[in-house]
Amino acid sequence: MIRGAPAAVNAPLPSSISLAATDCLTAFGDARQTHRALLESRRALAFHPVLGGDGGDPVPLALAAGHAYDETVPPSWLEPLAGLAARLPDDPWGTARFPVFVTSSNFGVGSLHAFRRTGDARHLRYGTPFATVEVLRERFGWGPNVAVVSHACVSAHLGLLLATRSLERGLATRALVFSFDFVSPFVAGGFHALKILNAGLPAPYSAAGTTGSIGLGDGAAFAVLAPAAGGARPALRLTAQTLHNEMHHFTANRSDGAGFAACLAPVQTTLARRRFWIKGHGTGTLEAGRLEAATLARLFPSAPLVAWKGSLGHTLGSCGLVELAIVGEALRAGMVPGTVGTEPPFFSDAVAAEPFPSRDYDGVLLTSNAFGGAHAACFLSHD
Amino acid sequence: MIERHLHAVRTDAPADESIAATRERLAGAFPRGSTRRMTQLGLLLGGVLSDLATGEDDAIVYASTYAETRALEDYLVSFPTPSPTLFQTSIHPSAIQQVLIARQQPVREFFPHTGRDQLVAHALQSAALAAAPRVIVCGGEEHGTWLAEQNAASPHAFAFAFALSVDPAGAVGHLRLESTDSPTGELALPEFFNALHQRSPLSRDVAPGLRLTLTWR
């Protein structure tokens, strides 16, 4: 029985959590295809009318193969997502010892927009978060032990942290974090209304322009986490995770960058002895990009900084997991893609625009940010 | 097995109260001028959280199946000229963000859960596993209009909040989560709210392999 503080556990704490398997789905394909495209500095973003069949301004979107931007019944993203799920390790997911943590910012909300637009009530089967997850659960053969978390663009990080805690407390044998976000007129219309999704292409961390621009992209990914068994040293280990919520403004950070630093403060000691590079958030907005790059350069001056949303678009609540899968592939291949789509001068000298080998490093810091001044970061260690 | 004590349990069941009436009733719970753009769910949660004095080191676990129903409905109606304000307000964690931004209260860990049949189980498990010494657990719904007619929104409005800790001093209730062999289990948010509102005990399987026992002093 646990009566004490959460540090008291009823199972041995693993020395670290192993990233046992991971993959993703982007407009380029799986993690291997996406990594290769990023190394070649290719952009998946292309211009589409923001309201799809209803027209509107052209905005940069990166849509996965098979995904029709105007929602269908069933949603056209379901088959590509099933293709990703088919690559999951064969475990009894959704049962008591094999929990699933589904994270998303959008779920099937594009279907609500389609219902409103067409009046076709069949769209409603996919319109609420629980309904969408139920469709996935039935389709993928998962049991009902599926926790669902939605915290805008840091959603995937929360799934990783909750899965880690379940493993650390001995409540799970292996845990699956599964994230998906597919772009629809609902979400593109919102970012367009906020004027950050516009006729420009994103140039993460670039100080060359006067207007910030983001792109939006389809993204889905999974990560299977497991305890490091029997003192073994797994190849990829999640060794630190941290969160912070500024609660300063809905769509802006504190102007001194304090929120970025507050998130990273608990892991600074861990990171001080490591040689690592940083996969940043880097959406292409000016103020957030400046704050992020400046804070990271101040805290970790020797760590190169890259971001991939200039190519893939912002994959929203799934970005943390999509980019983790690409990091995993970069480490396997030994080559880290640079910051695609950007141009100097940069907000910091640490911004790496070109690919570089991973062999000189033993870790990667992955960061994401969201509405409400939400910040999340995790550290991936490797040999 | 994980055990925690409940402190400062607060509930609000406003029935069919209008947003304007909720805003007027709860105005004292917010800084002056901050409620004008708040949703009903944000107002209700601000009300039940008003005397919990959330601190930066508390963790917050939030549970809602439908969350910002009215903002979502109005945002959808705003097409083909979508409203930026309604878009940002319609996101799942918005109600808590409205409350804490009004207070300018940062918080390190914030876990907004959604779902239905296992929502309570997973939210309570997140709270029990949090590293923070005190965890604020809160949740609720606002009633929808045209989406509720399609069973895609809550027909009722309610909100709750309480603090969970290992400290029994001053506790009003006790919560236990234990592992079981059960392959099933469920507890939806309205039923959990009723147990809190009426101080009713609960003992049941709430998710595969997880049993909840809630008792009151």
Image: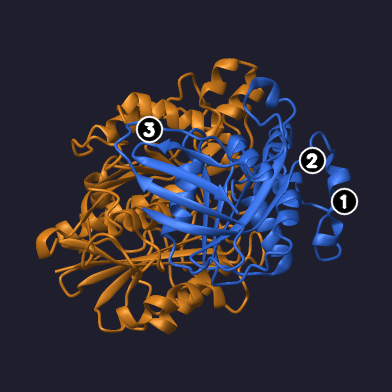
Chain colours: A orange, B blue
Q: Is residue B197 left or right of residue A18?
A: right
Query: Secondary structure beneath disc 3?
Result: loop
Query: Residue A38: x and y, percent?
Result: 29, 54
User: Mark 3 and 1 residues: CB-CB less than 8 Å, in contact?
Assistant: no
Residue B25, numbered circle? 1
Gap between marks 3 and 1 measured at Cα: 40 Å
What whole-number distance in Å separates the C-alpha atoms at marks 2 and 3? 32 Å
Q: Is residue A155 above or below residue A299?
A: above
Inspect the image, locate mark 2, and give the three-letter code of the amino acid beneath it: Pro
- Residue A95: image location, x then y, percent: 30, 36
Residue drawn at x 59%, y 62% is B171
The label shown at residue A314 is none
Q: Amino acid at mark 1?
A: Arg
In screen coordinates, is A269 left or right of B27? left
Can you see residue B105? yes
Name the residue rendered at 36%, 63% in the picture: A339
Are callouts 3 and 1 both on one chain?
Answer: no
Q: Which of the two discs, 2 and 1, labels the residue nearer the N terminus?
A: 2
Q: Residue B14 bears which disc, if any?
A: 2
Looking at the image, which is closer to me, A43 or A230? A230
Q: Secondary structure at mark 2?
A: loop
Instruction: Kindly identify which numbered label has been placed on residue A144.
Output: 3
10 Å neighbourhood of mark 1: few (<14), some, or many (≥20)? Answer: few
Counting every numbered tag in the picture gives 3
